[in-house]
């Protein structure tokens, strides 16, 4: 991974930390020189997001930016997948929301949503544009929605449907790991 070189004279045209009026270089004094906020302007969540992103980036050979976006996309995909399981078991239990299976997926869904919210916030704190983060979240929902409709048309039974959705979910994550290589 190559970061822009630091040091030398600071010309007004050089990129800076994203904080208003800050004269530091992007990522100055942080784990991620060359991108995002400087040490003084970065918060805990962002620091953690970058730490994870740099690890993932190295592992998958993508840029740390892509790794951060990927984390949001994965979390959004997880939410969609869990919600699909939830609606499948709800249907199987004739809409009985007190059924044990339904309650289990309900709590799973809450957990995944909370994780998505934290991931999205960390990405925004790390300096990813909020608009882009929301778009990625939305894409996760759209993909799941389209997939759900396709499966509806195939009139599969509940088990086949679940298997098809889980397989597609897995394949999407695998594919995503390969994009950007
Ligand atoms: Zn700064």
Image (spheres, rainbow, N blue to C red):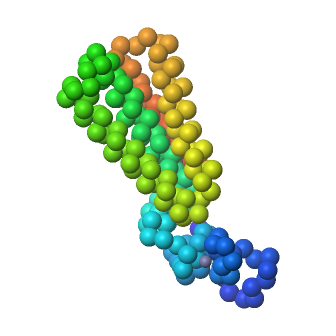
Picture coordinates of residue 137, whole percent (x, y): 53, 43
Looking at the image, is 144 positioned above or below residue 38?
above
Residue situated in front as seen by the camera: 174 or 54: 54
User: In the image, what residue occupies the spot 48% across and 60% down?
Assistant: 122
Q: Quadrant of the N terminus?
A: bottom right
Picture coordinates of residue 148, whole percent (x, y): 47, 23
Q: Is residue 67 visible?
A: no
Looking at the image, is 140 positioned above or below residue 159?
below
* Quarter assignment of residue 103: top left
Residue situated in front as seen by the camera: 94 or 4: 94
Report ligand 1 position as a quadrant. Answer: bottom right
Picture coordinates of residue 168, whole percent (x, y): 46, 30
Does residue 69 appear left or right of residue 160 in this picture? right
User: In the image, what residue occupies the spot 75% across and 77% down?
Assistant: 14
User: In the image, what residue occupies the spot 50% across and 50% down?
Assistant: 72
Q: Is residue 83 visible?
A: yes
Looking at the image, is 56 positioned above or below residue 153?
below
Picture coordinates of residue 95, whole percent (x, y): 30, 19
Residue extending furthest toward the left: 100
* Quarter assignment of residue 33: bottom right
Residue extending furthest toward the top: 155
User: In the image, what residue occupies the spot 25% across and 21% down?
Assistant: 96
Residue situated in front as seen by the camera: 131 or 59: 131
Does residue 106 appear left or right of residue 12 in this picture? left
């Amino acid at each position: 991974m190559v970061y822009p070189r630091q040091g030398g004279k600071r010309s007004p045209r050089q990129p800076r930390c994203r904080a208003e009026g800050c004269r530091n270089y992007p990522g100055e004094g942080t784990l991620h020189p060359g991108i995002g906020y400087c040490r003084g302007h970065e918060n805990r969540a962002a620091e953690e997001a970058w730490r994870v992103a740099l690890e993932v980036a190295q592992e998958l050979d993508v840029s740390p930016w892509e790794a951060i976006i990927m984390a949001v996309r994965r979390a959004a995909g997880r939410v969609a997948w869990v919600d699909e399981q939830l609606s499948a078991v709800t249907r199987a239990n004739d809409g009985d929301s007190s059924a044990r299976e339904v309650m289990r997926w309900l709590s799973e869904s809450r957990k995944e949503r909370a994780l998505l919210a934290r991931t999205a916030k960390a990405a925004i704190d790390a300096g990813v544009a909020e608009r882009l983060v929301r778009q990625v979240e939305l894409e996760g929902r759209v993909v799941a929605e389209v997939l759900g409709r396709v499966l509806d048309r195939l009139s599969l039974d509940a088990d086949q449907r679940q298997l098809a959705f889980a397989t597609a979910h897995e394949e999407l994550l695998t594919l995503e790991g390969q994009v950007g290589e």
